[in-house]
Image: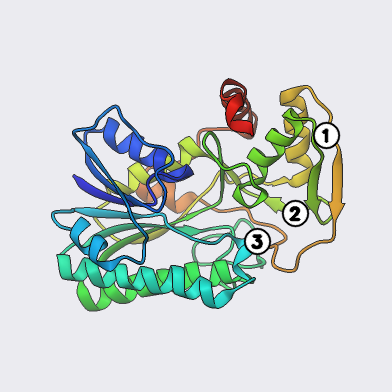
Amino acid sequence: MRILVLGGTGFIGSHIVDALLDEGHTVKVIDRTLKHINNEFPQFVEYIQADFADSLVLLEALTGIDLVIHLISSTVPGTSNLDPVADIQSNLVNSVNLFKSMQQAGVKRIIYFSSGGTVYGNPVQLPISESHPTHPISSYGIIKLAIENYLFMHQQLYGLTPIVLRLSNPYGPRQGHLGSQGVIGTFLRRIIQGQPIKIWGDGSIIRDYIYIADAVSACMAALKLDQSGVFNIGSGQRNSLLEIIKEIEHCTGKDAEIIFEPSRGFDVKTVVLDTSMAKNILGWQSEYSLKRGVGLHYDWLIKNSKKLV
């Protein structure tokens, strides 16, 4: 297939591009910065450095494309509430423009990476299935959910075939080292460098952490699906922040210095995803335990120690 990956040089996107090229697909990538580029298959991949808001570049890039993978987001849960208007303009408006451009270009298929960690809000039951009420408590989650709704509006009105992957908290090689980019990578880097770990709240917040290879395999499974749908993609396992730190201490052989900060109102207390629908329809399930994933991430960081700065 000829596939356009929006956000294809970032943490998740670059791994997906690698997998697409390994399977013989022809890939175009649009991203604001070209961080992680695959040079193994230059004849099968084209990188375009452009802003998501550049509708002319986007429309041209969609020419001849069979499927779009949409990974772009300019915010994270911790920053989205600072300027909700900017969140709407940069993420929701640009995504709706994308769907309009797809309609003009005759591209019907799209895989959209939504957020299983934020669209549901604080859960009323665990694990969280796709039919759980959606009451996000951050602008990030609200925008993700709004984009989902626009996708299915375009399905109803214009024949779009969207697949929404509600991803839990991903981690693994190439992830950014800022706190907003994932706690496991941030905690690993800090403990390797002998720096304190900062936690918002008492460390009891529970998340569903998924290793990057599992997230990629879910996307590759979705490629083969010829129908639309919404799927939770996570490990199905619950781990608190303090449990994550214990696993990292065990992996690295180092004790962590923890600094506790006041809790934040936009942090969902507990997220554990029910992934049975992905198993039954996509034929996908998580294969990496937390111990294995943390170990692989740690090994990568050690081998790429120059990237820790």
Query: Which amino acid, by three-letter code, is at mark 3?
Result: Gly
As helix, strand or loop, the secondary structure at mark 2 comes to: loop
Residue 293 appearing in the image: no
Residue 301 point in image, percent of width and height? 60, 27
Residue 235 appearing in the image: yes
Query: Which amino acid, by three-letter code, is at mark 2?
Result: Ile
Residue 78, label in figure: 3
Task: Quote the CA–CA distance across marks 1 and 2.
Answer: 18 Å
Residue 181 lies left or right of residue 72; in this view the side is right
- Image quadrant occupied by the N terminus: top left
Q: Which residue is identified by label 2? A: 205
> Colour scheme of this structure image?
rainbow
Tag 2 or tag 1, which sits nearer the N-term?
2
Instruction: Give neighbour class at mark 2: few <14, some 14-19, many 20+ (Cα, 10 Å).
Output: some
Tag 2 or tag 3, which sits nearer the N-term?
3
Q: Which residue is identified by label 1? A: 256
Residue nearer the viewer, 233 or 58? 58
